[in-house]
Image (cartoon, rainbow, N blue to C red):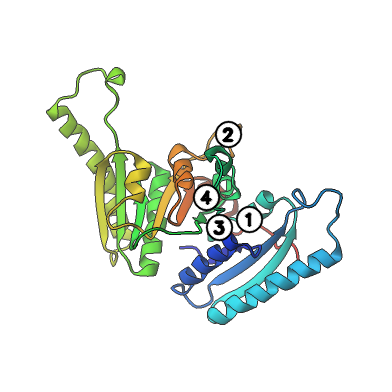
Amino acid sequence: MTVRTVVAWDDSVESRTAVAWAIERARHTAAGHEVVLVRVIDEVSFIPGKTITPEDFHAASTAVAAEAARIARELPAARMSSQVVIGDTLNALRRYTDPASLLVVGTEARTYAHFRFAWSIGARLAATALGPVAIIPRHVTGTRSGVVVGVDGSETSTRAALFAAGEAALRGVELHIIHVWLVPPVWQADYVYDDLTLDMLGEEHESIVHDAAELVRRARPELVVKAEAVRGTTVRALLDASPLPQLVVVGCRSRSAVNRFVLGSASHELILNLDVPVVIVSDRVREAATAVGWQRTYEPIGG
């Protein structure tokens, strides 16, 4: 379970949606939970030819402090603070990520091609963060309950399942563990699939989700856990689970150095089809924990 929530805020509709989600989540956390509101003045996208003046910094500091004060009134048991940072948005926010922190960002309404949306700040942060990242859409469709997590038997998905269990326990809701699989295309198979072969394949995949469920139940015996293996496509199985989830959690394995800004296929497609809050848990969480002993990897910057 994370002990700190960091919310990216710039007074946009998207960031206000992210703040509202973070506030609702923080209502269930223990007293003293730390909430940090971060305002990044992006010097890269600042008006060409115009420098960031002390007045600009002061105005941003005043605005974010006022928003932090408002949140503090709603969350009197939380430890609330705010900071202003000048720099590249991606790198600035990434410095606030670590294994014990949840970084929360909003998303823009997608009115353009998927390719551009794939390079949103949320997608890039999720691919490079050293801790879990929550990406919050402006609009959530349908009536929703419970937490869904996708597992595939990897260490990263196990970490995602344990994180999802913590989120479900925090909210007092059911955890739905889903493993999605497809029969390999016939041209990739060494033999023709018959009913017996498909049954054997199904049993293998059932064992993956069963093992994940047993691990979660041992860690969270108080939690109601539902587990199933589903034949289909990963994203649709997670987003269309019954009942519709209020939160979806997936793991993301690191890519090569060349592709380190690119999410895995399932995480990527989830963001492209976002209609519910999603948390991406990268295996870089493990790297950060090993490197710093689960201590924070950032130093406070800004005012």
Query: In the current view of this chain or complex, which residue is farthest to the left?
Result: 196
Q: Which mark is residue 285?
A: 4
Amino acid beneath label 4: Val
Q: Quadrant of residue 97?
A: bottom right
Nearer to us: label 4 or label 3: 3
First in sequence: mark 3 vs mark 2: 3
Amino acid beneath label 3: Gly
Mark 2 lies on residue: 259
Image height check: is 124 above or below 299? above
Amino acid beneath label 1: Thr
Q: Quadrant of the C terminus?
A: bottom right
- The residue at 50%/78% (across/down) is 31
First in sequence: mark 1 vs mark 2: 2
Q: Real-space Cα distance between discs 4 and 1? A: 11 Å
Badge 1 marks a residue whose secondary structure is: loop
Q: Residue 21 location in percent, x, y?
A: 49, 66
- For label 2, the crowd category at 10 Å Cα-Cα, with few meaning under 14, some 14 to 19 and many 20 or more, is few
Q: Real-space Cα distance between discs 1 and 2? A: 23 Å
Q: Which mark is residue 172?
A: none
Badge 2 marks a residue whose secondary structure is: loop
